[in-house]
């Protein structure tokens, strides 16, 4: 057998380590269940949203007696205001009142068009009230016009021709609300992904340290290759999960009709994947260095807290950024390398990050990755074989 | 030095103010089983970790096959660390295949070799189990398989026999002898000195980071003083005390235990005993490695 064995190349070593990580994680029940649970929650949320969209704004108006004549103008007037109104003929006024009380009808309208009487359970929608008032006034006006010897239809044509002129300084984006939701979801996924998989890097390193398998590994693989393989393997696992969640979420949101701007969402998802990779590499070696300082799983949380805090700050700042993505604060925060991976994708989603900002953030983040990887690798190499009590960062850097 | 010899040449290491190794020098020749003994903290593990490059030496050099050991040569070493190290959640077979691959064995050969050692070490039924579910003894067998799975040219084993049942000890001894017979230098540390004495071609004793004795068991014990038990019922008390080079250690009833200074002829003692009457017993004790170890380790311990 000595004939076939040859020294392993760095690339092969990194690939082997990465493959092991990928295989070990993807096959675990934790990964499958975790992904399934997040998907289930997402699906339930979307279905709930879709049901709300379909039902919440629909108002059922019962018309009884002479009021039945206003069905047409009521639907037209409501349509102009974007209200979803369904009219229903109600033969018996008493039955109609009972339906309103039980909630089967939202509104019951009776009386003559010029003198409408409205019954509601508690409160009449302001806009619907305006529509009904308008219809009533129209009726009165028409009667007066006839009395004055004018043709109501002609007068109304002139009245309707009157228009106000509106000049908008910015194009209104009717999908702004959806963009904000997409931005929030993306930010959440990125925060969770980077934190979870970054912590896994640290835990994996401590596992190797505490089980001492690292001694065997390092007698054949260089520390640098072991670290890189681990980071790549776990990074890919996280990327796979994020892609599954992103694509499935997108498909479900489009299918349920909650999401109508699939194009924007797809672009955001692609940018999200890019920024996940950048963010993961930015934090992975820092997590790795932190993990290599301790030898027991119980101590991991202590060393990871400072790193997790930075991510958490980014996540919290994200809510402000999403609300006001154009502001100076948002722009500056999203350009800071430690926060860019979480904040910039949401600004891309809301359409507020210009190409120049994106390029600037990319360059700054790549520079930060280079610096932190160098530093993290140094700490890792110095600390990985020192077992026992926690190693101080200063000692690891000096070694 | 010769081909395929592992040489540890004046290796020194300090941890802060503590001198862990002080110019440790010995060599392990091809086909040789070398026993490395010393009390806890004497420097055995530190030496082995330096050989594997897990620790860096402050001074000195480790050579194999005449050239300094580099990262490339280390992949040809089979290593069993003192603190057992395997992925607890990885299956036995997967683990061995992975470790073989990391040492540069192609996948198919890695698989074949892993299966081979699994069978050889009696782990066939546990090959799909996670390592953490195995008993400590079985984990130890997996650990040995991990040291052997890539067909190493050198074996460095730190306490391979600790925690093994007698049958596993036999299997382990057999495997080590077999590997040595193929021309592989094998060095292992152990506290089971009888085992070391029985198994090893040569032995090195380390004390406080210094090699205090090195050689075959016979060489190490030959220079030591010899003890003789003599049972001569008719001998008067103090019969042996006047003999030159003889020190009486114990005298009770008809038995006498004497210690001979190096170079003293035991036949002189026998002649003196026979002169007093019949001799029922005349036993020469070779000091065991255990005794030698004890004296080597305690000697000058106060300095």
Image: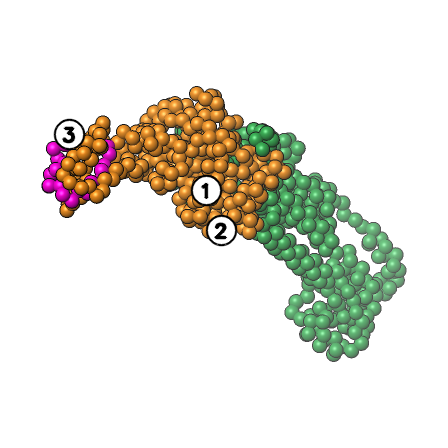
What main secondary structure does the magenta stretch of the protein show?
loop
Give the label on residue B134, or none.
Answer: 2
Chain at tag 3: B
Question: What segment is highlighted magenta in the picture?
Answer: B225-243
Q: Is residue B91 above or below residue A132?
A: above
- Identify the chain drawn in green: A
Same-chain status of marks 1 and 3: yes
Q: Could you tell me which residue is drawn at 65 percent across and 58 percent down?
A: A44
Element type at mark 2: loop
- Identify the chain drawn in orange: B
Badge 1 crowding class, 10 Å Cα cut-off, few under 14, some 14 to 19, many 20 or more, is some
Q: Could you tell me which residue is drawn at 30 percent across and 32 percent down?
A: B221
Element type at mark 1: helix
Residue toward you, B299 or B242: B242
Question: As drawn, is A338 to the left or to the right of B163?
Answer: right
Question: As drawn, is A213 to the left or to the right of B40?
Answer: right
Chain at tag 1: B
Q: Which residue is mark 3?
A: B244
Same-chain status of marks 3 and 2: yes
Q: Which residue is mark 1?
A: B172
Q: Quadrant of residue B56?
A: top left
Question: As drawn, is B61 to the left or to the right of B253?
Answer: right
Which quarter of the figure is the C terminus of chain A placed in? top left
Question: In x, y percent, where is residue B151?
Answer: 54, 34
Badge 3 crowding class, 10 Å Cα cut-off, few under 14, some 14 to 19, many 20 or more, is few
């Amino acid at each position: 057998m000595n004939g076939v064995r040859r020294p392993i190349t760095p690339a092969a070593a990194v690939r082997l380590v990465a493959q092991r990580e990928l295989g070990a994680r993807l096959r675990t029940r934790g990964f499958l269940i975790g992904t399934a649970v997040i998907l289930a929650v997402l699906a339930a949320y979307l279905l709930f949203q879709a049901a709300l969209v379909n039902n919440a704004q629909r108002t059922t108006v019962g018309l009884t007696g002479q009021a039945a004549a206003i069905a047409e103008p009521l639907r037209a007037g409501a349509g102009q205001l974007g209200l979803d109104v369904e009219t229903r003929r109600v033969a018996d006024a008493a039955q109609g009142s009972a339906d309103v009380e039980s909630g089967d009808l939202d509104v019951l309208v009776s009386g003559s068009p010029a003198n409408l009487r409205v019954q509601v359970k508690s409160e009449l929608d302001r806009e619907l009230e305006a529509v009904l008032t308008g219809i009533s006034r129209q009726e009165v006006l028409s009667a007066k016009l006839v009395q004055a010897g004018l043709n109501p239809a002609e007068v109304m044509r002139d009245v309707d021709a009157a228009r106000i002129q509106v000049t908008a300084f910015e194009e209104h984006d009717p999908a702004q609300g959806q963009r904000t939701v997409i931005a929030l979801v993306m930010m959440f996924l990125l925060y969770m992904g980077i934190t979870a998989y970054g912590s896994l890097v640290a835990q994996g390193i401590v596992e190797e340290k505490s089980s001492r398998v690292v001694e065997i590994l390092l007698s054949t693989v260089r520390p640098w290759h072991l670290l890189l393989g681990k980071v790549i393997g776990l990074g890919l696992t996280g990327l796979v999960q994020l892609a599954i969640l992103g694509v499935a979420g997108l498909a479900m949101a489009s299918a349920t009709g909650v999401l109508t701007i699939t194009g924007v969402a797809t672009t955001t998802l692609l940018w999200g994947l890019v920024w996940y990779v950048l963010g993961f590499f930015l934090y992975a070696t820092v997590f790795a260095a932190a993990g290599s300082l301790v030898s027991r799983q119980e101590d991991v949380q202590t060393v990871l807290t400072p790193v997790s805090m930075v991510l958490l700050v980014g996540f919290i700042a994200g809510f402000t950024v999403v609300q006001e993505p154009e502001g100076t604060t948002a722009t500056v925060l999203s350009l800071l390398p430690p926060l860019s991976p979480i904040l910039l994708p949401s600004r891309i989603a809301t359409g507020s990050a210009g190409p120049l900002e994106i390029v600037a953030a990319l360059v700054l983040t790549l520079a930060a990755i280079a610096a932190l990887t160098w530093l993290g690798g140094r700490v890792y190499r110095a600390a990985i074989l020192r077992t026992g009590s926690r190693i101080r960062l200063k000692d690891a850097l000096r070694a | 030095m010769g081909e395929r010899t592992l040489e540890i040449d004046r290796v020194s290491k300090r941890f802060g103010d503590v001198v862990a190794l002080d110019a440790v020098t010995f060599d392990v020749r091809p086909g040789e089983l070398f026993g490395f003994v010393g009390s806890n903290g004497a420097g055995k593990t530190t030496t082995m970790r330096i050989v594997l490059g897990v620790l860096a030496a402050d001074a000195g050099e480790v050579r194999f096959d005449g050239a300094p050991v580099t990262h490339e040569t280390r992949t040809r070493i089979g290593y069993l660390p003192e603190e057992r190290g395997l992925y607890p959640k990885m299956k036995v077979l997967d683990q061995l295949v992975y470790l073989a691959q990391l040492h540069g064995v192609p996948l198919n050969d890695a698989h074949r070799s892993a299966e081979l050692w699994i069978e050889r070490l009696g782990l066939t039924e546990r090959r799909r189990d996670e390592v953490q579910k195995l008993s400590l003894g079985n984990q130890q067998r997996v650990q040995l398989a991990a040291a052997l799975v890539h067909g190493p040219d050198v074996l460095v084993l730190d306490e391979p026999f600790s925690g093994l049942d007698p049958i596993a000890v036999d299997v382990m001894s057999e495997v080590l002898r077999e590997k040595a017979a193929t021309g592989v230098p094998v060095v292992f540390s152990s506290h089971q000195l009888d085992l070391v004495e029985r198994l090893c071609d040569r032995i090195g004793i380390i004390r406080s980071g210094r090699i205090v004795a090195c050689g075959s068991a016979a060489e190490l014990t030959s220079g030591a003083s010899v003890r003789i038990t003599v049972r001569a019922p008719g001998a008067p008390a103090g019969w042996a005390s006047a003999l030159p080079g003889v020190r009486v250690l114990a005298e009770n009833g008809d038995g006498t235990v004497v210690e001979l200074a190096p170079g003293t002829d035991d036949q002189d003692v026998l002649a003196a005993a026979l002169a007093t009457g019949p001799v029922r017993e005349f036993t020469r004790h070779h000091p065991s490695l255990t005794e030698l170890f004890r004296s080597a380790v305690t000697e000058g311990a106060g300095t």
